[in-house]
Each structure stands twice: as C-alpha cells, then as structure tokens.
Amino acid sequence: TTFKHSREWISGLPARQWTHGLREAVDAVIVGTNTITIDNPRMTPYLSKSKRPKLPVRVVLDRELKLSKDLHVFGKDAETIVLTSKKHPVKKIAAYATARRITVLPVKEKNKSLDVKEILKALFRIGISSLMIEGGGEINASFLNAKAVDKVYMFVAPFILGGRTTVSSVEGRGIAAVKDAIRLRDVKTSKIGEDFLIEGYVK
C-alpha cells in the first residue's frame, strides 16, 4: 500500500508483485473513493508474471457519484463497476454510467455509508463470489465491522513510520480494548523480498 497523501511505496517490488498475483486469483478487487482520489490506481495485475494475467473486475465505492471520468480506473484495460447510493435519481446514475462507459449498481445506505451486506449481495447477484478488499483504512474497517472478512493478508515493511496523525490500515471508530481486538487464527508468516507477510483467517 502507499502512505496516504504520498506517492512513495511502503512495500517493496516483490511484495507488490505477490499482491498482483493475488488479484488474479479473485473475481474482483474493491476500493473506496479516497483511495481512487489520492492514488489514482489502475487496479489491474500489471506487475503479474503471467503472460496473460487474469483481470479481476474493478469495484469502486462512490457514494456521492463524484469521481472524475478521467481516472485510471475508468480506462478500457479492465471492467469497472461502481456502487453508489440508492438515494440518487435514476437519470443521474445513468448519466454517470454513460460518461464512464461502466456499470453502476445502486445499494442501500447504513449510517451514511454504503451498507456492506448490500454491497456483497449486489456483487453476488452478478456472479462475483471472491472479493479482495484493497482500499484504505475506512473501507477495511467497514468490512471488518460488518463481519464480512474471511481472510487477512498484511505486509509489514522493515522500517518505522508513525506519529500522532499517522493513518492506520484500519480506521473507522477504532478498537480501544485488547479484549475487543479482531483476532486471526491459523496464522502463517513468510518473507517476500524485504517485507514480511502475515496471513490468517478472521475468528
């Protein structure tokens, strides 16, 4: 991942190549509006070592329908689906979709955010059954809070970043007590390049 408001990579190239291999193994990759706005990612496995990499569907959450049509994610190199709020008029949703040549799926809101369970239902209805959450701290927190995460992959780089205003990989309201922490089971660790990969299933 990249450090918010910075274009510098935290993880090394081997870790990023590994992540792109994981993209090929899922039906879709999902990110939120903040990640798209700040990083302008392609969301394709362009670092894959495969000769013909499998392209996952790119899923973007744009609750307010405010993302520019010039962003990389709206390029022709892969299919893109945007999920937005059902509160928007049908004409507005249709105009947004037509301008970007993509599919837009309206879903219900919950607490002024797109409802995670409704997102998963909408994606399942169009044949997406494996989803990689590759967004920032807010989308990570929303899926974890909704108990919608099966497995976690986390890279740790061999250097230290921090400070009072440091952005966390899991944001939202946060978890104050150790007893309330989201714990993993069947944990495995491995070294990929200079980075360490921790993977495990959510209890």
Image: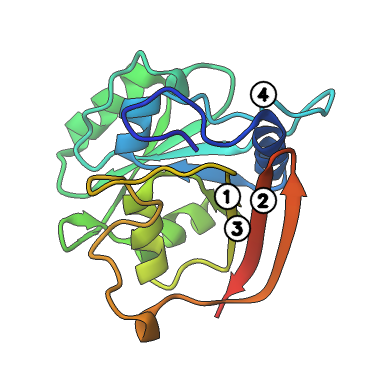
SS for tag 1?
Answer: strand
Estimate the x, y position of residue 93 in percent, counting from the top left: 25, 33
Callouts 4 and 1 close, C-beta under 8 Å = no
Name the residue beneath numbered marker 2. 196
Q: Is residue 49 left or right of residue 145?
A: right
In this rendering, does residue 130 appear at all? yes
Name the residue beneath numbered marker 4. 46
Name the residue beneath numbered marker 1. 156
Callouts 2 and 3 close, C-beta under 8 Å = no
Estimate the x, y position of residue 6 in percent, counting from the top left: 37, 26
Amino acid at pointer 3: Ser
Residue nearest the observer in this picture, 15 or 159:
159
Measured Cα–Cα span from mark 2 to mark 4:
22 Å
Q: Residue at x 82, y 28 (%)?
A: 50
Estimate the x, y position of residue 119 in percent, counting from the top left: 39, 56
The numbered mark at residue 129 is 3
SS for tag 4?
Answer: loop
Q: Earlier in the sequence, mark 2 or mark 3?
A: 3
Query: Furthest-right residue in view?
Result: 51
Query: Furthest-bottom residue in view?
Result: 179
Q: Earlier in the sequence, mark 1 or mark 2?
A: 1
Counting other residues with Cα less than 10 Å from the Cα at mark 1, is it few (<14), some (14-19), or many (20 or more)? some
Amino acid at pointer 4: Tyr
Q: Earlier in the sequence, mark 2 or mark 4?
A: 4
